[in-house]
Amino acid sequence: MGKLLVTGVLGQIGSELYQALVNRYGIDNVIGVDVKSEVECSEIGSMNYNTVDVLDFFKLRKVVFDYDVEIIFHLAAILSAVAEKNPQLAWKININGLYNILEIAREKKCAVFFPSSIGVFGPHTPKVNTPQITIQRPITVYGITKLTGELLCDYYFNKHNVDTRGLRFPGLISYKTLPGGGTTDYGVFMYYAAIRDGKYRCYLRRNTRLDVMYMPDAIRAIIELMEADSDKLVNRNAYNIAAMSVTPEDIANSIKRKINEFEVTYKVDKQRQNIADSWPDSIDDTAAREEWGWKPRYDLDAMTDDMLEKISKKLKMEGSNVPR
Ligand code: VAH
């Protein structure tokens, strides 16, 4: 595999994907870009990094050509809850940023990974075991940008032969880099609160059912998809993938197996509840399993045990400067 570029490399997915790609292909073959400068973010020091805004076409194009990039993992995006507060910015970053990536990939003949989301589905979509091909009428600007992104990626594959591939991620749970304003961030915050405070006030109803996935599974899915045989990919933009369909109460009960006194209360945030209610309860990922061998490795309790162990170590090392 040639040189790999990760945009949004300082984000929740980008930061872990960068490290996984370095571990697999070597640091000389991976470049990360994001909008922060090395002064603003200490993690950058150890990375192959350039400060680039995906809206800056010429600076982005220069990085792709200077490093002779062959695959672009385009993670830069505004997530659902933040997007609803600033739809214009979300449209600019999520659409114009992707358009720049696809135009550069067309010229440079790069492959492109695009992170879609279960946010592309809406209230008219079958909520249980949501099919790969189904009604997609999202009610959030985030979902609209991700659906538009799927269609743009398909267009560039069919019209310009750009090797675009995507995944419809569920809510992703991780401990290394905090999520950036999504609707499913509650899962991450619940684990931190369980260890640090022994209690958590959840902004979604206790019985709000959503698909979630542990980050190690998500990172492996990206790499396995981009290494898959292109000729076998039919639903390339973008695959449903799933791991577990859970509620906040399910996660709380899984945590209580290890932290018995953990208490969760519920104070619904209407906006994020409305977003969550418009998304599926569970996802059918048969196409991903059949076309490139997708299979999750973490269930809820395995994720909980690993999250609690890793966050405990992180809090000991970094102190409590982590989310409340
Ligand atoms: C969000 N974490 O909450 C993202 C994701 C399915 C949710 O797309 O916006």
Image (spheres, rainbow, N blue to C red):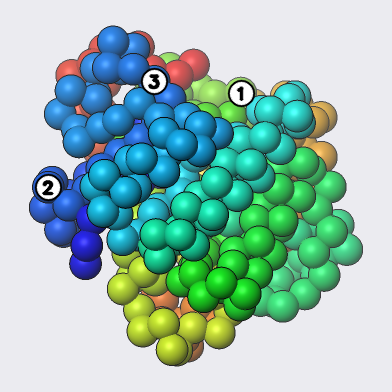
The residue drawn where x is 72% and y is 78% is 133
Most foreground residue, 58 or 208: 58
Q: Residue at x 77, y 74 (%)?
A: 134
Residue at which label 1 appears: 201
The label number, if any, that marks residue 36 in the structure image: 3
Q: Which residue is mark 2?
A: 28
Q: Disc 2 or 1, which lies upstream in sequence?
A: 2
Quarter residue 11 falls in: top left
Q: Residues within 10 Å of mark 1 (few under 14, many from 20)?
A: some
Say which residue appears at 72% left-offset and 56% top-offset. Answer: 148
Instruction: Say whether mark 1 is within 8 Å of ligand 1.
Output: no
At x 59% / y 67%, what residue is drawn?
Answer: 156
Q: Quadrant of the N terminus?
A: bottom left
Q: Position of residue 196 (x, y in %)?
A: 37, 19
Nearer to us: label 2 or label 1:
2
Residue type, mark 2 in image: Asp
Q: What amino acid is found at the position of numbered circle 3 in the picture? A: Lys
Question: In the image shown, does 194 or 123 lie closer to the viewer?
Answer: 123
